[in-house]
Amino acid sequence: AQPDAVLRLEGIVAGYGDATVLRGVDLAVPAGKVVALLGANGAGKSTACAVAGSMVPTAGRVLLDGEDITNWPAHRRARAGIYLAPEGRGVFPSLTVEENLTTWLPSAADREKVYERLSHLADRRTVAAGALSGGEQQILALAPALVRPPRVLIADEPSLGLAPLIVEQIFELFGELRDRGVALLVVEEKASEVLALADTVAFMRLGQISWTGPRSEVDEERLTSAYLGLA
Ligand code: ATP
């Protein structure tokens, strides 16, 4: 066993009603590491994120720092340091950037730390969050994590529909959080920018991890076979 895994999924079976989606998923995310979870549409990646963040599986265990949190409700997991990066819905569109930050960071000193790091947010502090681009909203939703780093950050397709420059900024933030000891699980459908950041890559296929290993072992051939289901 690797005692340093902050988040661990063990033998997870989960689904919706009668439909089983995850069929025995094992996944470990260590502190200060990025695990990229890749796989085709419908493979079960989002369901794996949900099991880590809020959903109670049919079988298997979810461990946080070795503690069994399988049956904990979402708010308790959040308090324990599991941050499920929201897709846009994490910000209040009618509140300004400053007001949004205040809901997570009541201390003005903490908000200043965000503005120092993210000057484009500082320039927009009086703008309604709903008027920001999708990528800027995503950065706003991630900003509190920079000041109060979670134990685990889970991002489900953070690059989806965003301009390359914003994607680059988001992955830069992930890199900073990794360097500060956060355990990151980043889901993408295609191998993308995430490969440059990942320490470990896990491919998911038909509700199971079909291959996992260090990023250095992921080459074109591995990618092709993983996506064709030959891994
Ligand atoms: P995607 O890239 O499309 O999100 P994914 O790998 O993340 O794919 P999941 O979203 O976990 O896969 O979906 C796996 C299967 O579970 C799919 O067949 C999907 O239709 C089904 N599914 C997902 N969410 C629900 C839900 N809330 N209710 C019923 N079925 C669902």
Image: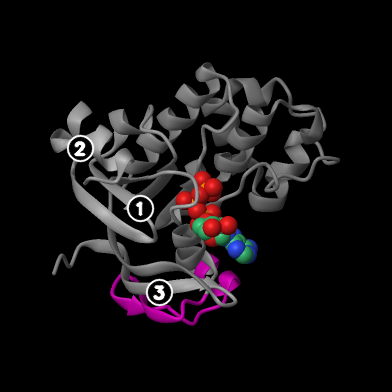
Q: Which residue is mark 1?
A: 205
Q: Position of residue 199 (x, y in %)?
A: 23, 41
Disc sitting over residue 10 in the figure: none
Q: Give the colouring mode of the picture.
A: one colour
Q: Position of residue 134 (x, y in %)?
A: 68, 30
Amino acid type of the residue tagged 3 in the rendering:
Val
Q: Is residue 57 above or below residue 214?
A: below
Mark 3 residue's CB less than 8 Å from ligand 1: no
What stretch of residues is rendered in magenta?
56-78
- Which residue appears farthest toward the top when viewing the image? 165
Label 2 SS:
helix
Residue 202 highlighted magenta (yes or no)? no
Q: Which residue is mark 3?
A: 13
Amino acid type of the residue tagged 1 in the rendering:
Arg
Amino acid type of the residue tagged 2 in the rendering:
Arg
> Regarding ligand 1, which quadrant of the image does it lie in?
bottom right
Quarter residue 131 falls in: top right
Residue 179 visible in the displayed image:
no
Category of crowding for the residue at label 2, using alpha-carbon neighbours closer than 10 angstroms: few (below 14), some (14–19), many (at least 20): some
Q: Position of residue 179 (x, y in %)?
A: 30, 39
